[in-house]
Image: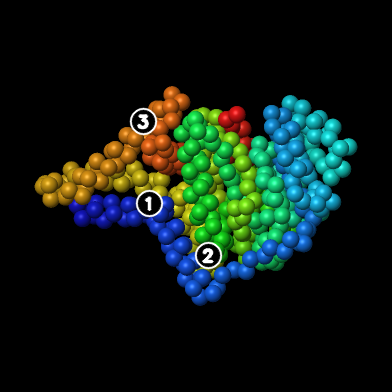
C-alpha cells in the first residue's frame, strides 16, 4: 500500500512539473534540434504585401471605451483603402450603436451591424463573417488598444499559404501600485508569450488570445453559438486542417487588468469551463498518429493545463499526508516531511496573498503562490461549472481597472 501511494505521489508531481515546466524545456530542446538541422520555418516580411483586411470589433455596451477604441483603430499604420472596420453592436442600449453610426460619414470604411437583441460575441462573429469580402479578418476587443504596426505585423505571415491564422499577444497594463490580480495576470501572460514563441518555432500555436487574432476569412467556418472560447476553437480547427497558426508578439492588444480578484475569478472560471468544453469538441486532436506535433503541443500545453494539473495538486497534498501517516518511522523519510512542509508554506502564502489582495495590499513575494493557486482553483471550479451545463455563449462583462 505504501509503495502504491508513493508511486501515485511522484507520478502526480511529475505531471504537474511537466505541465508547467517540463513541456517548455522539451519544446525548447526540440526547437534547438530543428535549428541545428536547418529545419527552421521560413519567415516572411515583405513590406509591400498589404492585402485587404477587415477589423471586426464586437462592442456590446462599450460607451466607456468606444471613443478610445475608434481613435486607436483609425490611427493604425495601414493604408486606409486596404482596411475595413466593422463594429458589431447588437443589443447595445447605452448609446454605442448611435455613436458608431454618427462616425460613418467621417470614416467611409466604417461599417456596423446592430440590432435589438443581444446574442453574444460568438453570434456577433458569425454574423460578421458572412458580410466580409476581404481575404483576411482580424478580431479584436473593444476594451483593448492595438500597437501602431499591428496589422502590418500580422498580415506579413499570410504571404505563406500554409499559414491559416495569426495570434497576437495580449499585454496587461499594470502600474506600480497595482493589485496582485493584475500583477499575477501580467506574469502569467509573459510566461505564456514565451511558450507561444516556442510553439510557433516548433510547429504551431495551440490557441489564440481573443483580444487579437486573425484568420483567413474562408477558413473561419461556423462556430457553435454556445462556444465559450471562440478564439481557441477556431484556431485549433484551422490547425487541424493542416494550416499553421503563427504567434506574432509584435502585434499586441493592451488592456487593463480585472478590477478585483472577484472579477478575475469570474473570468477565469468561465475560461476554464470553456477549456473543458473545447477538450470535448476537439477530442480528435488526441490522435497523435494523425496530427503528430499538433497533438503533442495541444495535449501538453493546453489539455493538461486545464484537465490534469489542477486536479493533481490536491491529490499531491492528500497523498503526501497519507504517506506520512502510513510510515512507522517518519525520520526515515525526510523528503516527504520536507515536501509536506513546503506545500503547507506555499498554500499559506497563497491564502495570505488572497487576503491581502482583498485588502488592496500588494506583496510581490506572494504573486506566484497566490496566482498559481488561484488559476488552478478556478480550473477546478470551471470543470464543475462545465459539468453543470452552465455554458451560455454570452459573456458576463468583467469590470476592468481604470
Q: 71 left or right of 17?
A: right
Measured in 3D between alpha carbons, the distance from the residue under mark 3 to the one under mark 2, in whole angstroms, is 39 Å
Measured in 3D between alpha carbons, the distance from the residue under mark 2 to the one under mark 1, in whole angstroms, is 22 Å
Residue located farthest toward the front when viewing the structure as drawn: 176
Which of the two labelled residues, at mark 3 and mark 1, occupies the earlier sequence position?
1
Query: Height in image: 368 above or below 45?
Result: above
- Mark 3, residue position: 352
Query: Dots 3 and 1: beta carbons under 8 Å?
Result: no
Q: Residues within 10 Å of mark 1 (few under 14, many from 20)?
A: many
Q: Position of residue 224 (x, y in %)?
A: 65, 48
Of 340 and 127, the residue lying toward us: 340
Of 28 and 312, the residue lying toward us: 28
Q: Position of residue 326 (x, y in %)?
A: 17, 46
Element carrying mark 1: helix
- Mark 2, residue position: 202
Q: Which mark is residue 247?
A: none
Q: Residue at x 48, y 45 (%)?
A: 188
Measured in 3D between alpha carbons, the distance from the residue under mark 3 to the one under mark 1, in whole angstroms, is 23 Å
User: Residue 163 appears in which quarter of the rendering?
Assistant: bottom right
Q: Position of residue 300 (x, y in %)?
A: 46, 57
Which of the two labelled residues, at mark 2 and mark 1, occupies the earlier sequence position?
1
Of 303 and 383, the residue lying toward us: 303
Whether residue 283 is visible:
no
Q: Position of residue 373 (x, y in %)?
A: 40, 40
Q: Residue at x 49, y 37 (%)?
A: 183
Q: 82 left or right of 4?
A: right
Query: Dots 2 and 1: beta carbons under 8 Å?
Result: no
Q: Residues within 10 Å of mark 2 (few under 14, many from 20)?
A: many
- Mark 1, residue position: 16
Q: Nearer the viewer, mark 3 or mark 1?
A: 3
Q: Nearer the viewer, mark 2 or mark 1?
A: 2
Q: Residue at x 21, y 55 (%)?
A: 3
Amino acid at each position: 500500500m505504501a509503495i502504491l501511494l508513493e508511486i501515485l505521489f511522484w507520478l502526480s508531481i511529475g505531471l504537474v512539473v511537466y505541465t508547467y515546466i517540463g513541456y517548455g524545456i522539451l519544446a525548447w530542446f526540440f526547437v534547438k534540434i530543428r535549428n541545428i538541422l536547418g529545419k527552421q520555418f521560413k519567415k516572411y516580411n515583405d513590406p509591400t504585401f498589404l492585402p485587404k483586411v477587415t477589423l471586426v470589433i464586437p462592442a456590446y455596451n462599450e460607451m466607456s471605451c468606444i471613443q478610445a477604441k475608434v481613435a486607436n483603430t483609425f490611427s493604425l499604420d495601414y493604408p486606409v483603402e486596404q482596411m475595413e472596420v466593422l463594429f458589431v453592436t447588437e443589443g447595445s442600449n447605452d448609446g454605442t450603436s448611435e455613436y458608431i453610426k454618427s462616425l460613418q460619414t467621417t470614416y467611409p470604411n466604417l461599417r456596423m451591424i446592430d440590432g435589438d437583441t443581444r446574442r453574444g460575441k460568438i453570434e456577433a462573429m458569425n454574423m460578421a463573417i458572412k458580410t466580409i469580402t476581404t481575404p483576411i479578418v482580424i478580431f479584436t476587443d473593444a476594451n483593448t488598444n492595438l500597437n501602431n504596426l499591428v496589422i502590418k505585423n500580422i498580415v506579413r505571415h499570410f504571404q505563406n499559404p500554409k499559414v491559416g491564422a495569426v495570434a497576437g499577444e495580449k499585454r496587461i497594463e499594470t502600474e506600480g501600485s497595482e493589485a496582485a490580480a493584475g500583477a499575477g495576470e501580467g506574469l502569467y501572460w509573459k510566461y505564456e508569450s514565451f511558450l507561444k514563441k516556442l510553439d510557433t518555432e516548433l510547429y504551431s500555436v495551440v490557441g489564440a488570445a481573443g483580444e487579437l487574432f486573425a484568420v483567413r476569412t474562408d477558413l473561419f467556418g461556423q462556430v457553435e453559438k454556445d462556444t465559450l472560447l471562440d478564439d481557441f476553437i477556431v484556431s485549433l480547427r484551422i490547425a487541424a486542417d493542416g494550416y499553421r497558426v503563427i504567434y506574432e508578439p509584435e502585434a499586441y492588444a493592451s488592456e487593463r487588468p480585472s478590477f478585483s480578484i472577484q472579477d478575475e475569478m469570474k473570468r477565469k472560471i468561465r475560461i476554464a469551463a470553456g477549456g473543458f468544453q473545447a477538450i470535448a469538441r476537439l477530442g480528435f486532436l488526441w490522435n497523435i498518429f494523425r496530427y503528430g506535433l499538433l497533438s503533442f503541443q495541444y495535449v501538453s500545453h493546453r489539455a493538461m493545463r486545464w484537465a490534469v494539473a489542477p486536479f493533481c495538486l490536491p491529490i499531491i497534498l492528500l497523498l503526501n499526508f497519507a504517506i506520512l501517516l502510513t510510515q512507522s518511522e517518519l525520520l526515515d523519510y525526510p523528503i516527504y516531511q520536507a515536501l509536506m512542509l513546503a506545500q503547507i508554506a506555499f498554500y499559506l502564502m497563497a491564502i495570505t496573498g488572497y487576503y491581502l489582495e482583498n485588502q488592496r495590499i500588494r506583496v510581490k513575494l506572494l504573486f506566484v503562490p497566490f496566482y498559481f493557486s488561484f488559476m488552478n482553483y478556478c480550473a477546478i471550479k470551471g470543470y464543475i461549472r462545465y459539468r453543470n451545463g452552465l455554458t451560455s455563449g454570452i459573456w458576463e462583462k468583467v469590470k476592468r481597472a481604470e
